[in-house]
Amino acid sequence: MDLGLKNKIVVVTGAAGIKGSIGETIVQSLANEGAIPVIVDRNARGFGYAEALQNQGIDSIFVQTDLSDYKQIERAAKTIEEKYGRVDALINNVGVNDGAGLDASMDDFMYSLKLNMVSFFAMTKFCLPMIKKVKGNILNIGSKVALTGQGGTSGYAASKGGVLGLTREWAVDLIKDGIRSNAIIIAESWTPAYDQWIKTLENGEEKLESIVKKIPLENRMTTPEEIADQCLFAISERSSHTTGQFITVDGGYVHLDRSLLTE
């Protein structure tokens, strides 16, 4: 299926993670579809990612940005406007499950909100004139933590809950402009960050096995590629009448009947 993404300018935040991370995988999937990914992240590895894409003949850039700082986000948007003049799709992907719980300092909690939610608002606000110019769309990457809680991560849970609220608010605000706003909700996906987290646990392998057994569809984790595929479909014209939706890509982990977990 041709998703019609060729030469579309797609801004992806949090896209300079380790190879195999969700943001990086989205960028590679966009490139494979002929889109032009714009990488926005604070990590300098983004320069290498953009250079690799340029070597493939893709007019991609990396805009190094601390996404917890709205002033840097505003500058990033200006850089994107000077280079491309438009944004066909904005994928707000940045997210760090940082463990800012009830015992965290107020500064840590506020930082979590800035990175994991305020950045979504700021990036959307400053890119909106470019999105309106071409009736582009917005896709927010959410987390099951917003729906289920997790424990010990108040900042992240509050942020991801806020992201879902913003998704529907923007769908209402921008419907008159023909701009769609949707969210992808992720549960258990095997990424480099997940692998690192498992390795910090004393009983990591046992914990991993327990989680995987509870994923109803095929008893396996969602791959970053599956998430990226859903993202590309959601931002494409193949989803032209879908807005204000929370699309859960998790093998039924969050919503299906618990009787499925009975061995």
Image (cartoon, rainbow, N blue to C red):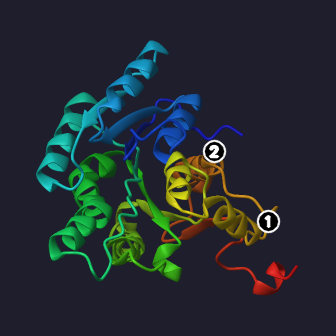
Q: In this view, does 60 lie above or below 210?
A: above
Res 251 seen here:
no
**Residue located farthest toward the front when viewing the structure as drawn:** 202
- How many residues crowd around disc 1 within 10 Å: few (fewer than 14), some, or many (20 or more)? some
Q: Which mark is residue 94?
A: none
Res 20 seen here:
yes
* Residue 151 horizontal side relative to residue 190, left or right: left
Pick the front one: 224 or 30: 224
Q: Is residue 251 above or below residue 61?
A: below
Q: Position of residue 43 (x, y in %)?
A: 30, 38
Q: Position of residue 103 (x, y in %)?
A: 27, 80
**The residue under label 2 is which amino acid type?**
Glu
Q: Which residue is drawn at 47% across and 29% down?
A: 7
Q: Quadrant of residue 222?
A: bottom right
The residue pinned by badge 1 equals 217
Q: Residue at x 42, y 34 (%)?
A: 37
Pick the front one: 120 or 242: 120
**Residue located farthest toward the right when viewing the structure as drawn:** 263
Q: Quadrant of residue 15?
A: top left
Say which element carries label 1: loop
Say which element carries label 2: helix
* Residue 55 horizontal side relative to residue 192, left or right: left
Q: Position of residue 198 (x, y in %)?
A: 56, 57
Q: Which of marks 2 and 1 is nearer the N terminus?
A: 1
Q: In which quarter of the image is residue 1?
A: top right
Q: Which residue is drawn at 36% across and 37% down?
A: 39
The residue pinned by badge 2 equals 225
